[in-house]
Image (tube, grey):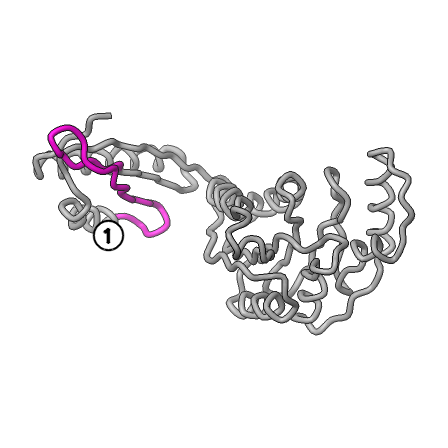
Amino acid sequence: MIVELVCVGSELLSGITLNSNAHWLAGQIAQSGGILRRVTVVKDDLGEISSAVRESLARSPDLLITTGGLGATYDDMTLEAVAAALGRKTSVDQKAVEMLKRSYARRGLDYELNEVRLKMATIPEGSAPLENMVGSAPAVKIELEKSGIFCLQGVPGEMQQIFNDYILPAIKKKVGHFFSKEVNCMVRGVTESMIAPALQRIVDSNPGDALYLKTHPQGYGENNVPQIRAQVVTRGTDEDVVAKRLDAVVATLQQEISKLGGKIVS
């Protein structure tokens, strides 16, 4: 299950807002067995969004997820841009209108569905609205021959609800049974450059998608001794195989560290 993200929002490029949506989605996708191949961040610009969507679809991911730009304001233009990328028009969708009405009713709001608010129910032709149980604007799903597109809200709580209700089940269904196990080892007396050749040998001896092995420098401790954190993640569809691979990699790593005069302290 190959996934790409297009995150929309000028605030993400100006340093005003941290892209926490991409961070959260990356973790959820990885834990469920999907592979997040690329994250693209673009400003609130019709041409930029449309271009990013076309470029992503040209790579034929299983899923393309966009975040942001589904609201009622002038700079919310994701759905219009996605429609342009697909060569489609947008129109007011009656199911999306009913979803808006229910969202206001749930919160006891008596809003008139004027032109501004109906913008949130104006979606690409051939797409399906997905009910937003947290906020107002529906999310949107589009099925293409090679890829599925989900356009999600930028508000984290709303985005997470749609992902959990609609996207996560789709990923799990395609991936099937999936297990992931992780160990983090604090290492003293070894630098990244010292351990790098051993890491390469370990990675090369395992299937590419089954092992993630990464070192994170932690500076220098007492007596100027170097410290690193070694992160070991094993993944697969057989829980026993995943667990045994993790144990084997950690044991090999420990041997290599010992040869270099270092030690795992935790």
User: Element type at marker 1?
Assistant: helix
Determine if residue 175 is in view.
Answer: no
Q: Residue at x 51, y 67 (%)?
A: 59
Q: Quadrant of residue 5?
A: bottom right
Q: Which residues are magenta?
A: 206-229
Whole-percent x and y of residue 259?
8, 37
Q: Residue at x 69, y 71 (%)?
A: 84
Determine if residue 14 is in view.
Answer: yes
Task: Categorize mark 1 by other alpha carbons within 10 Å: few (<14), some (14-19), many (20+).
Answer: few
**Residue annotated with mark 1:** 204
Q: Is residue 211 magenta?
A: yes
Whole-percent x and y of residue 264?
19, 29
* Residue 151 or residue 157, whichever sits in front: 157
Q: Kindly give the residue lying farthest to the top in the view shown.
A: 266
Q: Is residue 78 left or right of residue 121?
A: left
Whole-percent x and y of residue 262?
12, 34
Q: Is residue 170 magenta?
A: no
Q: Residue at x 61, y 65 (%)?
A: 49
Whole-percent x and y of residue 191?
16, 42
Q: Is residue 9 left or right of residue 142?
A: left
Quarter of the image with the C terminus is: top left
Circle count: 1
Q: Quadrant of residue 140?
A: bottom right
**Vertical placement of residue 262 versus 15, above or below:** above
